[in-house]
Amino acid sequence: MSTSPLSTAQAARAAIAARLDEIRKDAGLTGHELAQQCGWHKSKASRIARAKTAPSDEDIRAWCRVCGAEEQTADLIAASRTAESMYVQWRQIHRDGMRRVHEKTVPLYERTVHFRVYASNVVPGMLQTAEYATGLLRSITDFQGTPDDVADAVQARLNRSRVVQEGNHRFALLLEETVLYYRVCDDAAMAGQLRYLLEVMSRPNVSLGIIPFTARRTVWPLEAFYAFDDVQVAVETLTAEVNITAPGEIRTYLKALGELSRIAVYGREARERITKAIGSLR
């Protein structure tokens, strides 16, 4: 695994190791003493602390128990479990095209009851029309140089988006006002997409907020992220998808979402801003 900043699996392992070593120091134990109390070989604690050996769940439980820091166990185990999978480059995800990744995430969408989404760049996938999705996925395919299965990927995205219309799902979505103006497709498709936002926001299971250009920021603009209940947050960067499952980090993203929701507008004012964006296309 590369230690490049673009590949954070090793960085994540190092961060876990550093947190464990801080816990040991706070407990006033040497590495040898910790290993003894855990019943390990004398060098094991040192190897874990230097990120030479990845700790097992039981290793983390024992470490935290001996150091009197059991309240940190859950976060550390969650972080350790996702160290390898938390950062996956889009080129790897899309190596066979984009259809498959949409199909693969259908179970996640179907079991999620409460979706909370912050979109700073494009309309969230579950609200995209076919024409808008086609323009966007075409751009992504061309930029990444990955196999062209845009038509199939668009259909798979629409199939996955049925959760908005079917089942017991709730959606709290926040869009930066800029999203209403970024033209990732032609004007006709963009107008259709914005009209669909007006339609879908009237659904009782959908809350759609728009963060105005001029809003006084209490939270700066962030990269787009999707929260699936309270168990996972997917953050989208230019090069990769970062999947977060550590409870403490999830709480931080949900806190940011709460702060952003307070500066958003809803209902009539949100509709007025979407309608204004439609008018700008004429």
Image: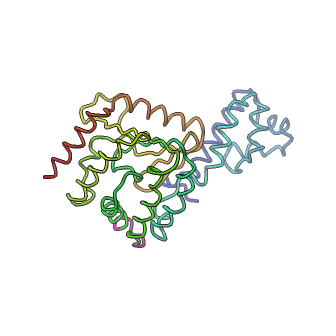
Q: Locate residue 16, reporting x and y percent.
A: 63, 42
143 shown above or below 115: below
Q: Give the range drawn in magenta.
A: 142-148
Residue 193 appears left or right of 124? left
Q: How many labels does the image show?
A: 0
Residue 174 appears left or right of 101? left
Report the quarter where the N terminus lies.
Answer: bottom right
Q: Which residue is drawn at 48% across and 59% down?
A: 89
Q: Locate residue 174, reporting x and y percent.
A: 37, 39
138 shown above or below 263: below
Q: Locate residue 62, reporting x and y percent.
A: 79, 38
Query: Foreground residue, 261 or 48?
Result: 261
Magenta run includes residue 146:
yes
Q: Residue at x 48, y 53 (%)?
A: 241
92 shown above or below 116: below
Q: Residue at x 39, y 43 (%)?
A: 203
Query: Foreground residue, 183 or 277?
Result: 277
